[in-house]
Amino acid sequence: MGQRIKVEASVVVNDSIVITTDRNLTVADGEGYSSADEAATATTFGARLAADLFESDDAITRVYVAANVVVLQRAGGWSDDANLQANSVIETFFLYY
């Protein structure tokens, strides 16, 4: 349905990962969520992406989306598999929206 989002950078800092994409997902004012239930109360692209990310990994504890940047916090840090999974959810978000 849509086009694949390109992840341009993915940087892990402690229990957080900062993912930069090739397109804006929100306006300049960001939006953050601490659970899938909280994200489900909003109808923005950022909220729907946050809900998908929470659903993909039970260890994700916080999602913040601002413009073309997604910041995720994850209990226990980021393994290579968890990093790839988060990137995959973001890259395919617009394909199935």
Image (cartoon, rainbow, N blue to C red):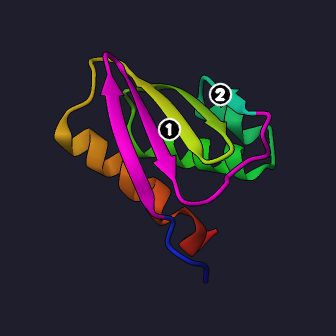
Q: Which residue range is magenta in the image? A: 6-29
Front residue (pair 60, 2): 2
Assign a secondary structure to mark 2: strand
Location of residue 87 in the rendering, given as x and y in whole percent from the top left corner: 38, 51
Q: Quadrant of the N terminus?
A: bottom right
Front residue (pair 86, 39): 86
Location of residue 51 in the rendering, given as x and y in whole percent from the top left corner: 59, 43
Q: Residues within 10 Å of mark 2 (few under 14, many from 20)?
A: many
Q: Is residue 27 magenta?
A: yes
Q: Are marks 2 and 1 in contact (CB under 8 Å)?
A: yes
Residue type at mark 2 is Tyr
Q: Residue at x 79, y 45 (%)?
A: 27
User: Based on the displayed image, in which of its 4 quarters is residue 79 positioned?
Assistant: top left
Q: Which residue is mark 1?
A: 54
Front residue (pair 70, 33): 70
Residue type at mark 1 is Phe
Q: Is residue 82 magenta?
A: no
